[in-house]
Amino acid sequence: MRIVEGLKYSKDHEWVKVEGNRATIGITDYAQHSLGDIVFVELPEVGDHIDKDQTFGVVESVKAASDIYLPVAGTVEKINEALNDEPELINTDAFENWLICVEMDDPTEVDDLMDATEYEAFCQE
Amino acid sequence: MGDLKHTVLYDNHVKAGATLVDFGGWEMPIQYPHGIVDEHLHTRIKAGIFDVSHMARFIITGKEATAFLQYVLTNNVFALDLLQAQYTMIPNKNGGAIDDAYLYRFYEDRYLLVVNAANADKDWQHLNNEIKAFDAQITDQSAELAMISLQGPEAKNILKKLTGSEFLTEPLKNALGILNYHGAPLLIARTGYTGEPLGFELFAKAEQSPEIWEKLLGLGAMAVGLGARDTLRLEAGLPLYGHELGLDSEGQEIPIFSCPLAKFAVSFAEDKGNYLGRAPLREQYCGFKSIMERDFSDLSKLPRIVRSLAITGKGVARAGCKVFKDGREVGVITSATMVPYLKAEGYGLDSKITDEKAMRGIGLALLDGDVEINDPVEVEIRNKRVAAVIVPYHLKSDAPPYARPILYGVEVTRQFESAANYPGKALNLLKKSLDNTHHRQYETINLIPSEQAHSPAVRLLSVMDPSFRYAEHKKTKSFYDYDVFYYQGTAFIDEIEYLLMEEFKQYFNCAEVETRVISGQMANTAVFSALMDYKNRVNRKVEAKRLGYILNNHIIRGGHLSAQPMGALHDYIAVDPRTEKTAVVNFPVEPDNLFKIDVEETKKVIATYRPELIIFGKSMVLHKEPVQEIRQFIDDQKLNAVIMYDMAHVLGLVGDHFQDPFKEGAELVTGSTHKTFFGTQRGVIAGNYDKDDYKYGLWETIETRAFPGSVSNHHLGTMLGLLMAAYEMNYFKDDYQRTVIENAKYFAKALAEAGLDVAGDPQISYTETHQVVVKVGYGIGPEVARRLEESNIIINYQATPEEEGFTASGAIRIGVAEMTRFGFTKAAFKETAELMADVILRKKAVAEDVKKLRSQFTTMKYCFDDEAIMEQLEKLKATL
């Protein structure tokens, strides 16, 4: 299982890359591995506002559909269109293939998330 | 997962890094590190192995074992011959399924019933409860006997390597075999849950199974978890208990007939007697029949059935999603997901499965009976309606060794030039026909055993004047059976037909001949129709009884298509009410020579089934048929079977060099006149009944089933041509027949010397006919045949008795008759054998060598070619 230093992590196995007020969000390598072959990704529309810990989309594998939660409240700025046609990209590299970018309402919400070391420990629990 | 049960293969799964889950109380692999997609695809193109030991295995024995099983299962146990398996349901008294199951009969008096893991306790209690009323015993052997499923196109090769056994089972679905694995019996069944045309379930001693599992992996199979097991069975449209069977999403019982496999799994045979749920199942069946006949006026007997659906919009459907048609809720998805497939390129036999992966959304749904195939529907996924369509199936397995995905909307198209330039088209047609004739007559070596080139005289006569006339005629009792013709201008053809019959009587050395049938298949149809009519001659006020039992050669052992229930027998063969199968039994073959009838075993079959018709003859034929031995046996036993010999392939070999069917005791001979015989393309029926024979009435019936039963116009041109061919045959047969058989033996040896694997018995130079069979490797017959054609050698690919069907053919079939007629010498056959080995073994292209060889043999032998004949042919040609 791969964990990237310098990112923030949620208990729902999302990663968050913070650049000023903007957060890029994806699912972790641990998440893609437990989901298995990803066959479909449903993402919100650009401009949607989503509250903290609310679902913003669905990642589906052959086995099951899994909701994905936004760890920080914000407004959707960009979505990763490439995943519409090639959802399996997430399996090839979960950190490279992000899901959405949001303009955060409150950048301090990031402070509640785990860092790489904490997340590694969390996964091993 | 402390309380979960483990199969005997648990350590193998852990070692392989499987992701384990709780499945019906068992800790089972959902997937291995390769993942569901690769496990699915590997099974489809190579082979997958599945630990299915969590399913339960019950053994049923005892005096009333069969009666017990007839009572607690829906299928007909009387249909289950030794070494066969059948899909069945364990019904409750309401016509719902307690479980679905597979019943195996490896041993005469012991049945093996395999049931789902999650239902095992429930099934065990139910069966133990019901068995009390019977003198029968049930034991649970799940622990002693492990179960591994091996599925996919490589399954057969892998299993052969594992066991060292060349012969596994008959190459038919549900066939069983008992092999040996290190001193213990290894039971194998051609069954599975993937839709693969090649697949086996192995019942191994529990102690041996971890080793077997590892060996199967070593031989190229991939371990497959429950995840891909589910996608594979979904793609195959197979039901899963708890989804398509059992209770529906609202907790209501799903009627058994809602499941599309019910029609194979439920029997209403009278001999089966009463059984649990029979009456409600009968009601469901009536509802099912209405739906299939598109009568939707009353859907109360069976409101909903399971259908396949393809998702055409964006989204992944799952079990529980509602289905809508025209805005109305019509049912619910029972199973669905995205499944992978590999894209294919090209058409038909030449299509290649690429390694490009793709995914498609498919499902099964329990839908109102009036929702039909091709109906557009919508599936509700997370409150969004996504487009879908009802499809007949998602996968087809009728081109072994591969199962092929069937994608919605794919259509095969061919080019058609619709421009109205008819003079141009006409000229083009003439040019192309000239090219084709030139190619096949001067440039190719033609080795298809069912083909024969015709002499110039035969060819020319076939297009002469009577070829567009009519000459219907019928024997009339008032005129002492003198033939009455219905048209004028028939004197010429009347004489021709009379002469033709006389020539054939001489050729066969028999009493009667009917020459109006225009093909070998029609000859058989006329005979079968006549036999059935004759059987019912005493009482015509009731529906005519069909024929049964019939003894014939099974198609996989070379039997003629025209003597099979799927061929010319179709409308004349009875269904045995006890087994609900067509009343056909097959000639047993010798264990070490599958091309040859086993006479002693055949006698046992005859004694058991007392067939009313015995049909000798094959299209893959290397041996004489034991007509004399079987005639002797029939007469000794005072049985009243009609012995018929369909000689289509060997019609031109009748006589001292091969077989004399009537002398040996056949009553009827049928055949096509253009394989080893000299043409034209027609059929013939010969009989050996004297006018005072009590069976002469049968012969008269054959004549009326030829005309007016089969033909009105009997194609007078080819009849005229056939008379010339009969002259040629009666004049040249001794030399021709001897040379053909000599050439076949010589060619077979030359092919073997060239390094090819020639089938048959080397002691007799492999063949006693005009045919040679060469094994080229499992499944590659079609490819080898194509390569040979590219090198101007025309043969046909052929499934051997071990193979599943024509697409899996591992052999080619060769005949020497046509090239013998063109005067091919031994040296020419030797050279052909070497060229064939170059193409088959070394993938060389040898078209130019073939053309050169063929160009030396373009003049037809065994025909009349003196000056007077040639002069007369020119005059005939000038009339065109």
Image: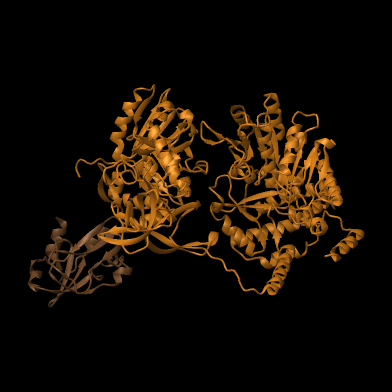
Chain colours: A brown, B orange
Q: Is residue A57 visible?
A: yes
In this orientation, which residue lies closer to the viewer: B670 or B93?
A: B93
Report x, y in % for residue B140: 33, 31
Q: Residue at 87% x, 58% y: name it.
A: B865
Split into 4 quadrants, where in the image is the N terminus of chain B? top left
Q: Residue furthest bottom?
A: A20
Q: Is residue B655 visible?
A: no
Q: Is residue B498 left or right of residue B2?
A: right
Report x, y in % for residue B548: 61, 33
Report x, y in % for residue B492: 86, 51
Q: Is residue B629 left or right of residue A74?
A: right
Q: Up-down: is B439 above or below B569?
A: below
Report x, y in % for residue B531: 68, 35
In this orientation, which residue lies closer to the viewer: B525 or B28?
A: B525
Locate residue B96: give its quadrant.
Answer: top left
Q: Residue furthest front?
A: B297
